[in-house]
Amino acid sequence: MYDRDTVKTKDTIKTGNGEKGKNSMTKFIFVTGGVVSGLGKGITAASLGRLLKQRGLKVAAQKLDPYINVDPGTMSPFQHGEVFVTDDGAETDLDLGHYERFIDEDLTKFSNLTSGRVYWNVLNRERQGGYLGETVQVIPHITGEIINFIYAGAEKSGADVLITEIGGTTGDIESQPFLEAIRQISLEKGRENCLFIHVTLVPYLKGSNEHKSKPTQHSVKELRSMGISPDIIIARTDEPFDDNIRAKISLFCNVKLDCVIENLTLPCLYEAPIMLHEKGLDEVVCRELGLQTPKPDLREWKGMIQRINNRQQEVTIAIVGKYVKFQDAYISITESLNHAGYDIGTKVKIKWVESESITAENVSEKLKGINGIIVPGGFGDRGIEGKITACRYARENDIPYLGICLGMQIAVIEFARNVCGLDGAHSTEFNEKSPHPVIDLMEEQVGITDKGGTMRLGAYPCKAKPGSRLIELYGKDLISERHRHRYEFNNSYRDTVTKNGMVICGTSPDNNLVEAVELPGNRFFIGVQFHPEFKSRPNKPHPLFLGLLKAALEDKLEGRIS
């Protein structure tokens, strides 16, 4: 719960609801979307965050989602895509991954809010008598909860600018409380401290060879009916439009001409900040909010774009999973691979392999032409044996392998079965009667029945073993990585696997939990219980993905392609 009375700030203002916290130092930017979904509100918000950060401002970001789930943690990846985990253990929307990658700031539990969480907080407070007999209503109680959350995000981050994206599409009934909340914030804070950015579609009709502004006009009309007039319109389009379209949008949507910003489809999403800067977005934002800043220093970002465009080599990495038909389920992994490729001048071609389709008979054909294998995290037993078979193929053929979360557990199961001779070795997640439960439920998870938010979540320390490949990659012995799991390496089998050649190369500082394993006899074979993909940045590739790609490129250059 985020009570405005508990969010203390430097100044307060008097409203009809009493005194409310007001951070006079924070400017608020609200990003909404119209016409259709999937226009890239998140990329727009993240790009703007990067531009403002390069102007010397402290930037924080939020995503407010209108669905009734408390968080995306229990949602199918086919429904929602990846669940992104923050350092403090929040299970969040995948757009927060974009924010972190672009802005290079660690976000928190104050960065993602759903309608489900809002109603959960309000109803729990009502049951506890927190409203002292009041009739609980959408306005002011639901909207007030949303406002409190936004204020808490500003307060906890200490940001100069807080960028808040409203999920969904303007006109959706479920988004209305969020729109009403940000309308109220603009009244409380003053329009000089709030900016509304509306991302819309400007379709191009090839038949008549013209752009159409009418969908944008109708979307803005819908937004204004909610009491919000956009200050800036980001016009998403596949083809450049001329000044006539810009002038028409400006006139009929009542925004300044230079506040109509063209947002073109790009071959690489990391080009978006440069393009939006060239279109004047950050300059307009600073002007409208009265922010006095130097010009952004984009030399590092432009250098990265140059490296992206000049990649000469190419490797193929197989991602063996159960959600490969919906690739947003692994978006942080694919981006992490790209980041590593940018650093070493290598394009990464992803070969998506449905784990359920892999058998001992067809594995060589399924994994033909690859230079490395990733088995990512996941839940449920569908495709498990296919993952184990792919892992065995990588181990026996010395193909660079990175196992992430479940992928590490798969490596242990495969090694236990086929090297240690432990027939029937498995995880109790998939076979409770396994004679050799080399992976078992974490002690702290015993007795837990609720599914949402109850796993081992967030950042935990890991101590790397001296002389290991892990410590070589990280360059230090104590690291911090984010987790999302219920099962762990069964310590009863430590001696067995280590005697047979698998190295436990990372543990919790107290040596109680196995965090990483490796095979020193292979070119690159590492499994980690954590999720390194959540820490990678386009200009700061994660060492594990960098190590995997270097080994894969080495394999290819030596002609060892499978």
Image (cartoon, rainbow, N blue to C red):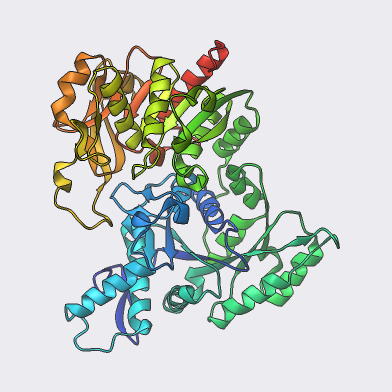
Q: Pinpoint residue 389: horizontal percent, then vertical percent.
A: 40, 27
Q: Quarter of the image for the N terminus: give it.
A: bottom left
Total count of labels: 0
Up the image or down, 233 lies above or below 364; here it is: below
Q: Position of residue 151 (x, y in %)?
A: 35, 67
Is residue 123 something one can see in this rendering? yes
Classify 295 as above or below 426: below
Asked whether 129 or 273 is in front, the reply is: 129
Pick the residue in front: 328 or 185: 328
Residue 100 located left or right of residue 120: right
Asked if residue 3 can be seen in this view, the reply is no
Name the spot of residue 253 as percent of width and height, x first.
68, 75
For residue 544, which quarter of the picture?
Answer: top left
Q: Residue furthest front?
A: 361
Q: Residue at x 47, y 24 (%)?
A: 361
Residue 552, given in percent of the width and then of the height, sits at: 50, 20
Residue that appears at 55% across and 30% down = 342
98 and 433: which one is in front? 433
